[in-house]
Image (tube, rainbow, N blue to C red):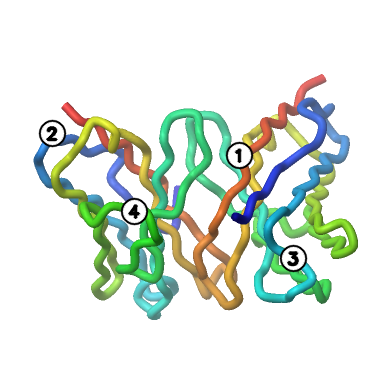
Amino acid sequence: QVQLRESGPGLVKPSQTLFLTCTVSGDSISSGDHYWSWIRQPAGKGLEWIGRGYTSGTTNYNPSLTSRVTISVDTSKNQFFLKLTSVTAADTAVYYCARDEIGYGKCFDPWGQGTLVTVSS
Amino acid sequence: QSVLTQPPSVSGAPGQRVTISCTGSSSNIGTGYDVHWYQQLPGTAPKLLIYDNTNRPSGVPDRFSGSKSGTSASLAITGLQAEDEADYYCQSYDSRLSGSVFGGGTKLTVL
């Protein structure tokens, strides 16, 4: 059974950098069979795809966030990461990591349980 | 404003059938990209409900079905149950934005 789990600080100050880790179990990131994505959801609002990474280092980002986002993969630890710079209150959200199929517009399955990140001084 | 448009809310009585629409455009659903549906129960992460327009993952009841035509897709739920009360999201790919996109979500209330 594939499981994903997000971890990281729950509180980040405005203008600082948000860094989250997603730890994968039950599947190997190095197999190259999937992309690995980050998705966020502000309280009471809908889902927003942030971007995805692949074992080769290939990445794809949401154009609205591309100047501030970096997604990377560590196959030795079976983890992938999200870095979001210059955060503001608008970045306050539950952040999910998810497995993404190879190709464009494929489904996300499974998802992590999510981690709440609050941007506040 | 979401690239994919869903009604904010739908409702139905137990046992009834409801449908949730997902309207896109020529740069996403209309191009032929697949549509996927997720169910998000209160306080939990989204769960894949329908993938590639019409397919159900193992464990999803056949009361849930998906369809796609032109620039739109639909999720149908028959034999409504109280446990179906949740938010539902559609997802596809947009070639103009070069990325995955979601609908704004639909809250299903079981009366």
The residue carrying mark 3 is A28
Of marks 3 and 1, the one in the foreground: 3
Q: Amino acid at mark 4?
A: Val
Asked if badge 4 and badge 2 are on a common chain, one would say yes
Q: Nearer the viewer, residue B30 or A117?
A: A117
Mark 1 closeness class: few <14, some 14–19, many ≥20 residues within 10 Å? some
Q: CA distance from mark 3 to mark 1?
A: 19 Å
Mark carried by residue A113: 1
Which chain contains the residue that carries disc 3?
A
Q: Secondary structure at mark 3?
A: loop
The residue carrying mark 2 is B14
Q: Secondary structure at mark 1?
A: loop
Q: Residue furthest top?
A: A121
Residue A1 in picture, x, y percent from top left: 59, 55
Which chain contains the residue that carries disc 1?
A
Residue B105 in picture, x, y percent from top left: 39, 44
Above-or-below relation of B67 to A119: below
Mark carried by residue B60: 4
